[in-house]
């Protein structure tokens, strides 16, 4: 059982790093930890004036920014429950989540507010603009008093680190956040994360991650997702880091330009971004005929790989100690090459229901094709007769595990059984606790003779083929079909007309099938004209294409 508590951890970090820069809406000006403290106290006054009690839910909808972080920290340290809503959810989904979560206050960006039907929000007392924290609507029935802005609370401006304090009114079992994994009414599942889950993730991060005090952090993954919230906001905040927020996941070119400016030590990203950088900037060089010959010469090979390593390090700002990916499978070819050049990268495994971290190993301990090893405060098992060799469902229990889905007992009972969380992920685990993900149980396809086919592994091979942007492998008529979105940028660069795409993809299908067992070969490729719709961690939404 964890003795540390989340609110004191956040308060102590604020006091300890009082004068250091805390947040920047990149590339704008920054606010310090003392500025954060004063604004949190102002938010607490707003909550009291609007009648918010401990345990009340407060919805937060908008893109990454300093105010997003302030509202999150202000809500949780007050003892209320934050409901972060992904910025790319539709207006209907956003409205549904606000209602389903029983939110009493809403902080929402003006552009999103303009698109929702405010009259349909059932329990909401007040709505604030996330852009500047001003009041958009006051719906209280009682006599209304003006909510004063932060600048009007002059007594807060002079507060010192010694005077800054927040009463901890929560236990580790109280709900800190409810995170919705999807927006639509039929699929809404609000993951209830208690304080113990978040503090466990922070403690694991303090033990394992390589953030230096005061170092810059580039937070571009959506903070409404558990992965970014825990490791781009909460953990860095408790390390005194300077967190630079970007309001979207950048294209590789923009990402690398920001890296060169910020020179971060640790970067959290998703595999798709790394795969794009590899495919666009590295693969054309290493697969040229001349380079293939040179890489076969041992001495020259070593020199070339070192130059590629140094070039990639410089591209990420030259200060990288570790690049951490997670949230989706990593392409095996890309991972193998990154290990070959000894680039400091690693892969973790997690899920929203664990707030999110389940397994992790730092880059020099990382094992090929693994997703790290079991972290502290968790126990992992694989439901298999031979967990090291025969894949089975990954189940786990521990401090990080959520308390259930908000107002959805049936879904809770499906995954929380006998004290264990049934993840729905299929994998193996070795004797040292390293986890190897093979796929999702609901995605597994049965071959003609009962063989298990993991579509994610077939997609990895297909994605390595020329002019394949991304792919999705599905079962249709008891056979494997693939949908491919071509790499149109590469096709244009090589002056290949659109009419040649079917022929190229048929060649790719034949080449991939040579690498696959008979039962997992692709029978047909369908060409998509638009990119696949994806989750915040850039996983394809498979259910839309079945």
Image: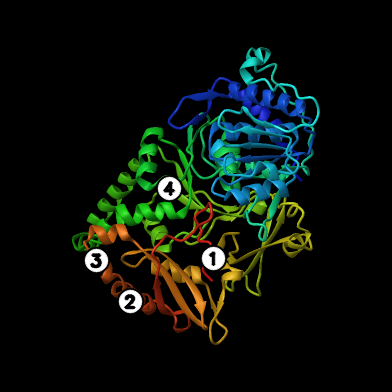
Which residue lies at the image location 52% right of the left edge and 37% below the top edge? Answer: 211
Q: From mark 2 to mark 4, how far is it between C-alphas?
A: 37 Å
In the foreground, 145 or 229: 145
Observer-side mark, 1 or 4, equals 1
Between 131 and 503, which is closer to the camera in this rendering?
A: 131
Which of the image's four quarters has the C terminus?
bottom right
x%, y% of residue 360?
56, 52
User: Do callouts 1 and 2 mark residues in contact (Cβ within 8 Å)?
Assistant: no
The residue tagged 4 is: 344
Residue pushed farthest left?
290
Of pointers 2 and 4, the one earlier in the residue sequence: 4
The mark nearer the N terminus, 1 or 4, is 4
Q: Real-space Cα distance between discs 1 and 2? A: 24 Å
Question: Foreground mark, 2 or 4?
Answer: 2
- How far apart, in angstroms, are the residues tagged by discs 1 and 4? 36 Å
Give the residue at mark 1. 544
Residue that numbered label 2 is attached to:
506
Residue density around tag 1, few if under 14, some if 14–19, many if 20 or more, within 10 Å: few
Q: Earlier in the sequence, mark 1 or mark 2?
A: 2
Q: Which of the 4 image quarters holds residue 423?
A: bottom right
Q: From mark 4 to mark 3, how far is it between C-alphas?
A: 39 Å
Would residue 91 appear left or right of 316 to someone viewing this image? right
Instruction: Find residue 497 and name its label.
Output: 3
Which mark is on residue 472?
none
Q: Is residue 516 visible?
A: yes
Judged from the image, the secondary structure of the residue bearing numbered disc 3 is: loop
Q: CA distance from mark 3 to mark 2?
A: 15 Å
Q: Residue at x 34, y 42 (%)?
A: 315
- The local secondary structure at tag 4 comes to loop
């Amino acid at each position: 059982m964890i003795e540390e508590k989340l609110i004191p951890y956040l308060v102590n970090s604020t006091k300890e790093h009082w004068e250091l820069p805390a947040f920047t809406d990149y590339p704008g000006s920054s606010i310090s930890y003392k500025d954060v403290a004063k604004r949190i106290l102002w938010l607490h006054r707003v909550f009291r004036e609007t009648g918010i009690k401990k345990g009340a839910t407060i919805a937060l909808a908008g893109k990454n920014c300093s105010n997003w972080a302030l509202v999150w920290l202000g809500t949780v340290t007050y003892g209320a429950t934050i409901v972060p809503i992904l910025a790319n959810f539709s207006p209907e989904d956003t409205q549904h989540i606000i209602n389903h979560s029983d939110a009493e206050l809403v902080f929402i960006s003006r552009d999103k507010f303009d698109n929702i039907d405010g009259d349909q929000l059932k329990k909401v007392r007040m709505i604030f603009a996330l852009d500047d924290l001003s009041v958009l609507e006051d719906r209280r029935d009682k006599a209304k008093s003006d909510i004063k802005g932060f600048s009007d609370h002059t007594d807060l401006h002079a507060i010192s680190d010694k005077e800054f304090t927040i009463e901890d009114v929560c236990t580790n079992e109280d709900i800190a956040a409810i995170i919705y994994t999807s927006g639509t009414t039929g699929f809404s599942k609000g993951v209830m994360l208690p304080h113990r889950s978040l503090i466990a993730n922070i403690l694991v991060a303090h033990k394992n991650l390589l953030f230096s005090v005061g170092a810059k952090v580039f937070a571009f993954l959506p903070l409404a997702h558990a992965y970014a919230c825990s490791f781009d906001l909460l953990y860095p905040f408790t390390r005194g880091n300077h967190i630079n927020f970007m309001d979207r996941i950048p294209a590789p070119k923009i990402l690398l330009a920001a890296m060169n400016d910020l020179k971060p030590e640790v970067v959290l990203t998703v595999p798709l971004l790394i795969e794009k950088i590899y495919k666009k900037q590295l693969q054309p060089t290493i697969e040229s005929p001349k380079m293939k010959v040179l890489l076969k010469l041992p001495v020259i090979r070593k020199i070339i790989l070192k130059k590629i390593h140094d070039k990639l390090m410089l591209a990420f700002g030259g200060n990288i100690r570790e690049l951490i990916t997670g949230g989706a499978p990593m392409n095996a070819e890309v991972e193998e090459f990154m290990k070959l050049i000894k680039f400091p990268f690693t892969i973790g495994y997690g899920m929203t229901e664990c707030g999110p971290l389940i397994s992790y190993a730092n880059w020099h301990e990382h094992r090929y094709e693994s997703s790290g090893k079991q972290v502290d405060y968790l126990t992992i098992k694989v439901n298999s007769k031979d967990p090291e060799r025969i894949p089975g469902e990954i189940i786990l229990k521990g401090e990080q595990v959520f308390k259930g889905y908000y107002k959805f007992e049936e879904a809770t009972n499906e995954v929380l059984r006998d004290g264990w969380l049934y993840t729905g992920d299929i994998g193996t685990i070795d004797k040292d606790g390293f986890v190897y993900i093979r796929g999702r149980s609901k995605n597994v396809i049965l071959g003609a003779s009962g063989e298990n086919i993991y579509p994610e592994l077939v997609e990895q091979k297909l994605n390595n083929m020329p002019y394949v942007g991304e792919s999705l492998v599905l079962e249709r008529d008891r056979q494997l079909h693939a949908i491919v979105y071509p790499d149109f940028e590469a096709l244009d660069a090589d002056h290949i007309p659109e009419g040649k795409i079917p022929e190229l993809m048929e060649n790719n299908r034949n080449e991939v099938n040579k690498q696959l067992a008979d039962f997992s070969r692709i029978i047909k490729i369908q060409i998509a004209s638009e990119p696949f719709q994806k989750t915040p961690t850039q996983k394809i939404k498979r259910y839309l294409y079945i």
